[in-house]
Image: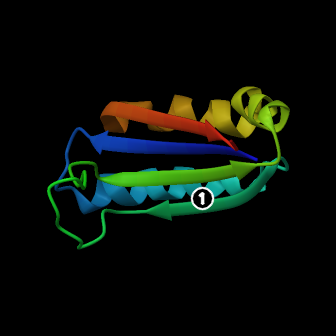
């Protein structure tokens, strides 16, 4: 299993319109065949010192393996998403992980 978790900080963090645009772009990624699971979310209401809640939107993707992830990275829908939505964010942090 290959887990790809992406966190987005929007330029206009309080903008419901920008958040909706980003969500719409992320929703289009569901059509990428190599994605096994997709979750689009926002920070939960949990509040403890170890929890990062400064991001605006998160994307969790699960792939069967690294090769499927690599296919996603160059997939036309992913490339289109980056092209159309990159202007919405100021920061992106990605955590990739694999099984132990």
**Residue at 39 percent of width and 33 percent of height:** 93
**Residue at 37 percent of width and 54 percent of height:** 57
Q: Is residue 83 left or right of residue 32?
A: left
Q: Quadrant of residue 15?
A: bottom left
- Residue furthest bottom in the image: 45
The residue closer to the viewer here, 78 or 61, is 61
Q: Position of residue 56 (x, y in %)?
A: 29, 53
- Residue furthest front in the image: 100
What residue would you read off at disc 1?
A: 27
Q: Is residue 10 above or below residue 73?
A: below
Q: Is residue 12 left or right of residue 66?
A: left
| Quadrant in which the C terminus is drawn | top right
Q: Is residue 65 left or right of residue 90?
A: right
**Residue at 65 percent of width and 30 percent of height:** 79
Q: How is the image coloured?
A: rainbow
Q: Quadrant of residue 75?
A: top right
**Residue at 56 percent of width and 53 percent of height:** 60
Q: Position of residue 33 (x, y in %)?
A: 85, 50
Q: Position of residue 73 (x, y in %)?
A: 70, 29
Q: Quadrant of residue 31?
A: bottom right
Numbered circles on residues, count: 1
The residue closer to the viewer here, 82 or 97, is 97
Query: Callout 1: 10 Å neighbours few (<14), some, many (20+)?
Result: some
Q: Position of residue 71 (x, y in %)?
A: 81, 31
SS assignment at label 1: helix
Q: Is residue 67 above or below residue 51?
A: above
């Amino acid at each position: 299993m290959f887990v790809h978790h992406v966190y987005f900080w929007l330029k206009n963090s309080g903008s419901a319109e920008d958040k909706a645009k980003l969500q719409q772009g992320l929703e289009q990624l569901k059509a990428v065949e190599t994605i096994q699971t997709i979750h689009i979310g926002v920070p939960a209401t949990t509040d403890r010192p170890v929890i990062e809640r400064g991001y605006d939107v998160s994307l969790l993707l699960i792939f069967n393996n690294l090769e499927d992830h690599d296919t996603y990275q160059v997939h036309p829908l992913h490339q289109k998403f980056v092209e159309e939505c990159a202007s919405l964010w100021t920061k992106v942090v990605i955590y990739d992980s694999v099984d132990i």
